[in-house]
Image (cartoon, helix red, strand yellow):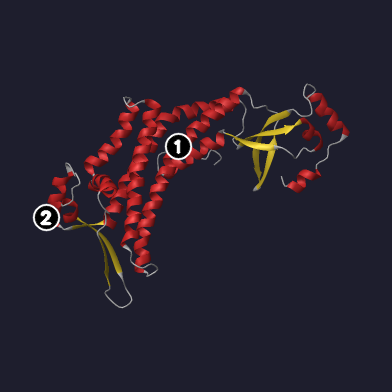
Amino acid sequence: MSEEDKQLISLSEEQLRQIDEQYSELNDSDIIERLAYLEINNNEKRIVISDIEPTKEIMSVSNQIFEIQKDFQKIKNMFELFISDVSDFLSIKNKLESKELEIEEADVNRFMIHLLSSGKLFVDFNENQIKQKYSKDSEEFDCIHGFASYQYDTNFAYRFCHYLRNYSQHIDLPINEVKAISPDDETVIIDFYIDLDYLLNSNFKWKKLKVELIKLNQETSKIDAIALVKEYFNALTELYGNYNKLFLKLNHNTLVDIKSKLESLKLKHSRYYISKISKYDLKYNPGNYTMSPLAAFAEIEEIYIELSKIGLVKIINKSN
């Protein structure tokens, strides 16, 4: 409803009398709260204010949904932070090759350090969320920690980037060479390299990885940073799927129960709000209400839609 529409609303004497009768126990300054929902007809949206009060039961269910939604959103937000850093790193190669930027090794390292940090943060953050909620000795924590352990044991890029992040924090920049090759006057090919001799000759404690790096160094003197980052990205994408699968396992039954509760409360499959307005405004300025979000079916459906995008659930349209 627009501000202009709000100002045009004027109630009849009979409507004013009905409000006074319905809310006879309230003073004009008292606030009236009602559930409101978004109605869409022919692509036109409008807010419908119902006669249903936001009871303690409704508020409790809403808060439960918001908590689950918040846990889900944290996983998504942390992964998107990592994706953004990877995108920045990969795009700098294209910008250098298109001559949009001058070659600056410091810029390349800055983006590399960012993605190494956000990748580690993505793993640590999600494990800490489970540890805080279920405890470090729980089956849930063993499960989520096992996902990262599997990547560490089976994926060199994940294993190496885990150490490289610590190396870049305490010893030196990770990328030692930005190589430019011009096969002709118009073309520039840019590559980023990590020098293995430089890493191995530093005083950084590579622990068990050192044997692996020495063996790799016998085959090649440097690591292609672009290829490394792409492999690291694939590993964390797999972890993102693992974390969401665990989220679904921990919350699906609860969400099913909540949906049944919402059905029993006679709520529509719409986006809900809490409408607040004083008794005085309801009579003389009925458009002067405020809206605050109330979690219901829409928020649950959004979670499952996101999970369907990564193949964890299948959305069935019952209207078809």
Left or right of 79: which side holds 46? right
Q: Quadrant of the N terminus?
A: top right
In the rendered structure, find residue 72 and report the number of the disc placed on it: 1
Q: Nearer the viewer, residue 19 or 217?
A: 217
Q: CA distance from mark 1 to mark 2?
A: 45 Å
Q: Earlier in the sequence, mark 1 or mark 2?
A: 1
Residue 212 in percent (x, y) is at: 15, 47
In the rendered image, which quarter is residue 34 located in? top right
Which residue was labeled with disc 2?
218
Q: Quadrant of the C terminus?
A: top right
Q: Nearer the viewer, mark 1 or mark 2?
A: 2
Considering only vertical position in the picture, is 94 above or below 18?
below
Amino acid of disc 1: Phe
Going 77% across and 37% down the picture, which residue do you hit? 286
Left or right of 133: which side holds 264? right
Residue 174 in percent (x, y) is at: 26, 54
Going 82% across and 24% down the picture, which residue do you hit? 21
Q: Nearer the viewer, residue 140 or 93?
A: 93
| CB-based contact (under 8 Å), mark 1 and mark 2 | no
Q: Residue furthest bottom?
A: 185
Q: Secondary structure at mark 2?
A: helix
Q: Nearer the viewer, residue 189 or 245?
A: 189
Considering only vertical position in the picture, is 119 above or below 111?
above
Residue 66 in percent (x, y) is at: 52, 33
In the rendered structure, find residue 301 and report the number of the disc placed on it: none
Considering only vertical position in the picture, is 19 above or below 184?
above
Considering only vertical position in the picture, is 138 above or below 103?
above
Q: Secondary structure at mark 1?
A: helix
Dot 1 crowding, Cα within 10 Å, few <14, some 14–19, many 20+: some
